[in-house]
Each structure stands twice: as C-alpha cells, then as structure tokens.
Image (cartoon, rainbow, N blue to C red):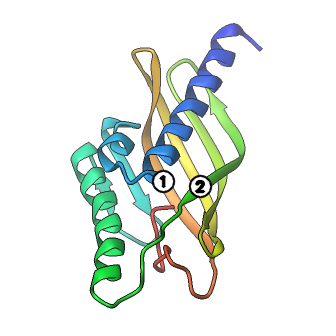
Amino acid sequence: MELWELVARERIRDTLAHYNWSGDAGRAEELSAAFTPDGVLQVRGGAAHRGRAAIRDFIGGVAGREAAGSSSGGPVGPKLVRHVLTNTRFRALSPEEATAESYFTVVTEIGLDHAGRYRDTLVPVGERWLIASRLVSTDWVVAGSVMASPSPAG
C-alpha cells in the first residue's frame, strides 16, 4: 500500500465521521459540508437531493419534522441520536475517486432504533475527500422508532 492511499483512507474516514457527528448534533449546514458543492444524497426509494443547499434543506426538514412532532402531539423526536458506523469497505480507490460501503446503526433513547448501509463515492477536494454521492439504505427499523420514517437519511 502506498502512502497516498493510507492518507486518502484516513481522510475519507474523517469525512464519514464528520457526516455522522454533524447529523447527530442536528447541524444540517455542517453535515452538508461533507459533500462536494454538487454532491448528491439519496435515500433508497426517494428523490435525489443535489447540491449542499438541497441536502441541508432535506436534512433540516427531517430534523424539523421530528421537532414539530414533539410539540404537535405527534411522535416525539429523539432526545439522543448516535450513529455508529462500522465495516467500512473500500470497493475502489484511486487518487481521483473512491467508492466505499459502510454499515450504520442508530441508537436513540429507546436503544437500537434502525440500521442500514451507506454506499458512497468520494473525490478529493483540496486536502479533503468529500462525498460526491451517497445512497442510504435502511434495512431495519424497530417498532416504535423515535427517529426513522420508512426511509430516514440514516
């Protein structure tokens, strides 16, 4: 393995963590910065959200619906959200592009809330590697989930 590949893998892991830490904190603007300016976020079966503003609005809308549910008598949004990212597998890696797949589980105050997979394409932008496209697949949701709709953004 060459040095550039080790550096790329660690920068990619940092971007994947940036996405989850920002999302867990409800920081849609910071989460969208994990994407290239024209990056795409798509939840399996849903529309593709292209560009940081669209991604920010989509993620912010999910958080807004959760918060609105708690004040409108609907489902209460989560008080605690922790994404646990595991088994990141690099399917391809070159100096120009990487493809990776990861499992995620989401823990909320009720315990394990939902689980699924990310399928990512990342590209180098300056010193960082950013997400050019992400497909989110939710494979399982607990009955009584406080967070997951039929197709959450992971």
Tell me which residue sits at (69%, 17%) in the image.
Answer: 6
Residue situated furthest right in the rendering: 1
Describe residue 134's horizontal placement relative to residue 26 as left or right. Answer: right
Callout 1 amino acid: Asp
Residue in view at x 63 percent, y 11 percent: 4
Quarter of the rendering containing residue 10: top right
Q: Which residue is identified by label 2?
A: 83
- Are the residues tagged 2 and 1 within 8 Å (C-beta)? yes
Q: Position of residue 110 (x, y in %)?
A: 62, 76
Q: Tell me if 32 is positioned left or right of 84 in this view.
A: left
Q: Which mark is residue 103?
A: none
- Give the image location of residue 55, x and y in percent: 30, 52
Identify the residue at image location x=60%, y=21%: 8
Residue in the image at 51% along x and 34% along y? 15
- Which residue matches tag 1? 24
In this rendering, would 61 be left or right of 150? left
Position above or below: 123 against 21: above
Query: Which amino acid, mark 2?
Result: His
**Circle 2: is it few (<14), some (14-19), or many (20+) Cα within 10 Å?**
many
Viewer-proximal residue, 70 or 152? Answer: 70
Q: Name the quarter where the N terminus is drawn.
A: top right
